[in-house]
Image (cartoon, coloured by chain):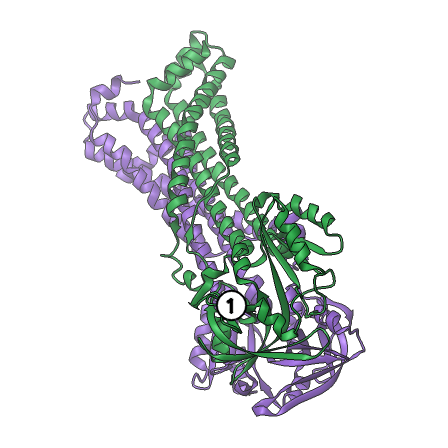
Chain colours: A green, B purple
C-alpha cells in the first residue's frame, strides 16, 4: 500500500517529480557522455600507437635490442611468416629489416634508423600510408626509392626526387652505402620519429648487403584486438627461440597513459555523482519543507515513522527508476550520433591537425559502462534520499499541521 | 528599507535559507575542484616533458633553433647572463653546449648526442646524480671524463673507468677528436635517450669542439610556472634580439602545446556538463522554495503589497543567498584545493608502479591559482542569479486567491 501512496504522491506534484526525474536523467547522461568522450580519446591514442607504430605483436631475435645489432636476424623468417599466416587469430603479418646508420644529403647528414619494408604486406599491417604528404607509398616499383619524414627533409634541405645516400654498418662490420631517391615525404604527430626514420623497400635493403633473406623484425595485427594477451602468450610458447612481444610490452607508456585516463575518469565520475547527490538532497529537502503540513497530517492520522521514511524513500527510488531509461536512451542516441560525426575540438586547438593529432573526438562506449553508470546514479540517488527522509520523520505532527 | 526587509526575511526561516545557500556553495566547491584538478594535470604534463630536459625557456644565438649546429653557438656573455639572472621568477640559467658526434670503443661505433654541462647548475634541470647506476658524478667542470647513458654503454660494451673515443665536427669545420674516461653510467627513462646521451663537463666539451667559452643554449629553470609569460616578456625586452633568440616550451615543442590545448578543450566540455548538473541542483532548490512560499506570497499580495515591490524584495533575498553561497564556497574551495596541494591524490596499483618506473611522481595534483577560484565563483554566481529569475516571474503572475488555497 505504501507503493500506491508513493506513486500517487509523485504524480500529484508533477513539477517536483519532473525536476528529480530530469536531474537523474541528466546525471546519467552526463556520466555516460563524459565516459564516452574519454573512451573516444583513449581509442584515438591506442589507434595511433597500435596501428601506426607498434602493431599488436612483434617478433625479434632475442639478442636484438634495437641498438644497431644488424647481425641479430630472425632465423628462417619465411617459415615463421608462413606459420603466422596460417594462425587463425592473425589478420596480417609483415617482415622488416632494421639498421641504424646515416642519411646524407649534399649539405648535411643525420643519424637515422633505416627500415626495409615490403610495401604491400606492410600496408595490411599498418596504416602508415595516410601520413604520406607528398609522393607515394612505394607505388610504381622504382628501384632505390626512399620515404623520409618532413622534419628530416627540412634538416637535410632535400625535397621530392632529391638524391640521398644511406650508409650503415653491415653484419660483418663493413660499411655499406647506397644512393636513393626521395619518392615520398611523410609527417606524423611525432616529429622526433619523423626525424629519425627512413623507409626503403626490403629488396633494395638486402641488395645492399648482397643477401636476400635477412630480416630483423616481424610485425602483425590480430583479427580481434582484445585477444592480444592470450595470443601473445601462445606465440611465446610457439616460438621459444624468438622474442615475442605485445604492444603492451613494447610501449608501456601507452598502457600507463590508458590507466591514467581511466583513473582521472573515476575521479571525475566521483565529482559528478557528488554534484548529482547534492542536487537531489537539496531538492528533496526543500520538498519535505514544502510538504510539512501534508506530512504532519499523515503522521497525525496514523502513518508511523518507519512508514513515512519508507514512503519518501520509495518516492525517490521510483523517480530515479523513471529517470534511468530516459538517461540511458538519451546517452545512447548522443553517442550514436557523435560517434559517427565526431565532436570537433578544432575551434580550441587549431594546430592539432598539423601534428597529425586528430582534432575530432569520436565518443565510444562499451555496453557494460551503461550499466555501471546507471547503478552508480541509482546508488547516489538512494543515498541522497536518506537525509531528507530522516528530516521528514523528525517532524512533530502537531506543529507540522499548524505550519502556514 | 527593501534591503532590511530582504535580510530579515532570510533569517526568518533559517533552515530554508541555509539549504538554498548550500546548493550554491556545493556548485562553487565542485566546479572549483574539478577545474583545479584539470589545471593541475596539465601543469604536470608540461612539467614532465618541458621541465625535465629542455627547460621552460631557452635562450640561444639567433637562428640556432632552426639550424642546431655548432656554428650557431654563442660566446659566453656576462651581460646576457646577468639579464637572465635578473628576470622575474628565474631560479637558474643552465648553460649547455650540444652536438652530434660518433662514439667509438673497440669495433663498435655509434652516433651520440653529446651535451656539455655545468655540473653544479645542471642539478636543477637534468639532475644526473640520482640517476647514476655505476660510478660517480662529475667533480669539476673541466675533468677529462664523461657520463654515459646505460643503453649506450651496453652497446659499446663499456663500464666505468673504461676509455671512450669521440670523433666529430667542431666549430667552423675543425675536427673534433678526443679520448675520455667513463666516470659514471646513468639510466634515463626514455629508451631512445638512454641509447644516445653522453654528458661531459662544459669546459671539456668546449675544448673538444674548439668552441672556447661558447654555448649552444641557456636553459632557464623557473620558480613559478604561472609566471612564465612575465619572464618571457622581460627577457624579450631586455635582450639584444638581433643577436639572441628566446623561446618558451610552447615554441620549442609545439606538439606539446597543441596536446595541452586539446586537453583544455575537452576539459571545457566536461566543465560545461558539470555546470548543467549543479545548475540543476540550484534550480531544484529554488523551485521548491518558491512553491513552499506561494502561500506566503499570496497573503502578502492579497493584503496589498505591490507585486513589483514583492518581486524586488525576493530578488534581493536571492542575491544575498547567492552571494553568501559563493563567498563561503570560495573560501571553502580554497581550503579544499590547498589540502590537496599538500596531500595530493595518490595513484593506485599498476598505474602508480608504472609512474614510478618512469621516474615520475605517482600523484595527481591540484593547481592553486587565484584565477580559478575567481572565475568559477563568478560563473556560479551568474548561473544562480539567472535561476532566481524564476521565482520573480512566478510572483509577478501570482493570483492571490489560488495561491492561498493551494497546498
A234 up-or-down from A253: above or below: above
Q: Which quadrant is the C terminus of chain A positioned in?
A: top left
The residue closer to the viewer here, B147 or A251, is A251
Q: Give the x, y percent position of residue B353.
A: 67, 51
Asked whether residue B278 appears in the rendered view, the answer is: no
Identify the residue at horizontal 72%, vertical 48% (top origin).
A238
Residue A177: quarter of image: bottom right
Number of numbered discs overlaid on the protein picture = 1
Identify the residue at horizontal 33%, vertical 30% (top origin).
B287
- Residue at the right extreme of this rendering: B161
Q: Give the x, y percent position of residue A240.
A: 75, 52
The residue that disc 1 covers is A191
Residue B275: quarter of image: top left
Lateral position of residue B386 relative to residue A391, left or right = left
The residue closer to the viewer here, A1 or B113, is B113
Q: Give the x, y percent position of residue A326.
A: 39, 29
Amino acid at each position: 500500500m505504501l507503493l500506491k501512496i508513493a506513486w500517487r504522491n509523485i504524480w500529484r506534484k508533477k513539477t517536483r517529480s519532473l525536476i528529480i526525474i530530469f536531474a537523474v536523467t541528466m546525471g546519467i547522461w552526463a556520466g555516460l557522455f563524459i565516459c564516452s568522450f574519454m573512451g573516444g580519446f583513449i581509442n584515438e591514442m591506442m589507434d595511433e600507437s597500435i596501428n601506426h607504430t607498434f602493431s599488436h605483436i612483434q617478433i625479434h631475435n632475442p639478442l636484438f635490442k634495437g641498438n644497431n645489432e644488424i647481425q641479430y636476424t630472425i632465423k628462417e623468417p619465411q617459415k615463421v611468416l608462413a606459420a603466422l599466416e596460417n594462425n587463425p587469430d592473425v589478420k596480417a603479418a609483415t617482415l622488416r629489416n632494421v639498421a641504424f646508420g646515416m642519411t646524407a644529403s649534399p649539405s648535411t647528414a643525420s643519424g637515422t634508423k633505416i627500415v626495409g619494408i615490403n610495401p604491400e604486406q606492410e600496408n595490411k599491417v599498418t596504416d602508415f600510408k595516410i601520413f604520406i604528404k607528398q609522393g607515394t607509398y612505394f607505388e610504381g616499383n622504382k628501384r632505390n626509392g626512399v620515404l623520409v619524414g618532413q622534419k628530416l627533409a627540412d634538416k637535410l634541405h632535400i625535397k621530392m626526387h632529391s638524391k640521398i645516400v644511406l650508409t650503415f654498418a653491415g653484419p660483418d662490420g663493413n660499411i655499406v652505402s647506397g644512393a636513393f631517391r626521395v619518392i615520398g615525404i611523410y609527417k606524423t604527430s611525432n616529429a622526433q620519429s619523423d626525424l629519425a626514420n627512413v623507409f626503403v623497400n626490403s629488396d633494395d635493403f638486402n641488395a645492399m648487403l648482397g643477401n636476400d633473406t635477412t630480416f630483423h623484425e616481424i610485425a602483425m595485427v590480430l583479427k580481434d584486438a582484445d585477444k592480444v594477451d592470450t595470443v601473445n602468450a601462445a606465440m611465446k610458447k610457439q616460438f621459444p627461440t624468438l622474442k615475442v612481444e605485445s604492444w603492451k610490452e613494447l610501449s608501456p607508456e601507452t598502457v600507463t597513459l590508458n590507466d591514467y585516463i581511466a583513473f582521472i575518469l573515476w575521479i571525475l565520475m566521483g565529482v559528478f555523482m557528488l554534484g548529482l547527490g547534492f542536487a537531489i538532497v537539496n531538492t528533496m529537502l526543500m520538498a519535505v519543507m514544502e510538504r510539512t503540513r501534508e506530512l504532519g497530517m499523515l503522521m497525525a492520522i496514523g502513518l508511523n515513522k518507519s512508514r513515512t521514511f519508507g514512503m519518501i524513500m520509495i518516492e525517490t527510488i521510483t523517480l530515479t527508476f523513471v529517470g534511468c531509461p530516459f538517461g540511458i536512451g538519451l546517452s545512447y542516441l548522443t553517442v550514436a550520433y557523435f560517434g559517427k560525426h565526431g565532436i570537433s575540438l578544432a575551434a580550441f586547438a587549431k594546430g592539432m591537425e598539423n601534428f597529425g593529432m586528430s582534432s575530432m573526438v569520436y565518443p565510444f562506449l562499451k555496453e557494460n559502462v551503461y550499466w555501471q553508470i546507471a547503478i552508480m546514479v541509482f546508488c547516489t540517488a538512494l543515498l541522497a534520499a536518506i537525509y531528507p527522509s530522516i528530516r521528514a520523520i523528525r517532524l512533530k505532527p502537531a506543529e507540522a499541521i499548524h505550519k502556514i | 528599507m527593501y534591503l532590511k526587509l530582504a535580510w530579515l526575511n532570510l533569517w526568518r526561516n533559517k533552515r530554508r535559507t541555509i539549504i538554498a545557500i548550500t546548493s550554491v556553495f556545493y556548485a562553487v566547491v565542485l566546479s572549483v575542484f574539478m577545474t583545479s584538478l584539470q589545471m593541475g594535470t596539465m601543469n604536470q604534463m608540461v612539467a614532465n616533458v618541458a621541465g625535465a630536459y629542455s627547460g621552460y625557456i631557452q635562450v640561444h644565438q639567433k637562428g640556432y633553433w632552426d639550424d642546431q649546429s655548432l656554428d650557431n653557438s654563442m660566446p659566453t656573455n656576462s651581460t646576457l647572463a646577468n639579464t637572465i639572472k635578473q628576470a622575474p621568477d628565474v631560479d637558474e640559467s643552465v648553460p649547455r653546449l650540444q652536438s652530434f658526434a660518433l662514439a667509438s670503443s673497440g669495433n663498435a661505433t655509434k652516433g651520440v648526442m653529446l651535451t656539455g654541462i655545468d655540473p653544479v647548475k645542471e642539478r636543477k634541470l637534468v639532475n644526473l646524480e640520482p640517476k647514476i647506476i655505476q660510478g660517480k658524478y662529475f667533480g669539476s667542470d673541466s675533468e677529462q671524463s664523461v657520463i654515459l647513458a646505460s643503453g649506450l654503454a651496453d652497446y659499446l660494451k663499456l663500464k666505468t673507468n673504461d676509455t671512450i673515443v669521440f670523433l666529430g665536427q667542431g666549430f667552423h669545420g675543425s675536427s673534433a677528436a678526443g679520448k675520455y674516461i667513463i666516470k659514471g653510467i646513468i639510466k634515463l627513462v626514455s629508451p631512445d635517450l638512454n641509447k644516445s646521451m653522453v654528458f661531459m663537463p662544459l669546459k671539456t666539451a668546449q675544448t673538444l669542439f674548439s668552441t672556447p667559452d661558447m654555448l649552444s643554449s641557456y636553459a632557464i629553470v623557473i620558480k613559478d610556472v604561472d609566471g612564465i609569460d612575465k619572464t618571457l616578456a622581460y627577457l624579450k625586452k631586455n635582450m639584444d634580439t638581433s643577436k639572441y633568440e628566446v623561446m618558451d616550451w610552447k615554441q620549442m615543442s609545439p606538439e606539446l602545446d597543441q596536446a595541452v590545448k586539446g586537453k583544455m578543450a575537452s576539459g571545457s566540455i566536461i566543465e560545461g556538463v558539470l555546470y548543467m548538473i549543479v545548475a540543476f541542483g540550484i534550480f531544484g532548490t529554488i523551485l521548491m522554495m518558491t512553491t513552499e512560499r506561494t502561500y506566503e506570497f499570496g497573503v502578502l499580495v492579497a493584503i496589498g503589497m505591490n507585486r513589483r515591490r514583492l518581486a524586488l524584495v525576493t530578488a534581493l533575498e536571492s542575491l544575498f543567498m547567492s552571494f553568501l553561497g559563493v563567498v563561503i564556497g570560495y573560501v571553502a574551495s580554497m581550503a579544499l584545493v590547498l589540502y590537496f596541494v599538500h596531500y595530493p591524490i595518490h595513484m593506485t596499483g599498476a598505474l602508480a608502479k608504472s609512474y614510478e618506473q618512469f621516474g615520475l611522481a605517482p600523484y595527481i595534483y591540484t593547481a592553486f591559482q587565484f584565477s580559478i577560484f575567481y572565475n568559477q565563483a563568478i560563473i556560479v554566481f551568474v548561473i544562480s542569479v539567472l535561476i532566481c529569475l524564476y521565482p520573480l516571474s512566478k510572483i509577478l503572475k501570482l493570483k492571490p486567491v489560488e495561491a492561498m488555497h493551494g497546498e
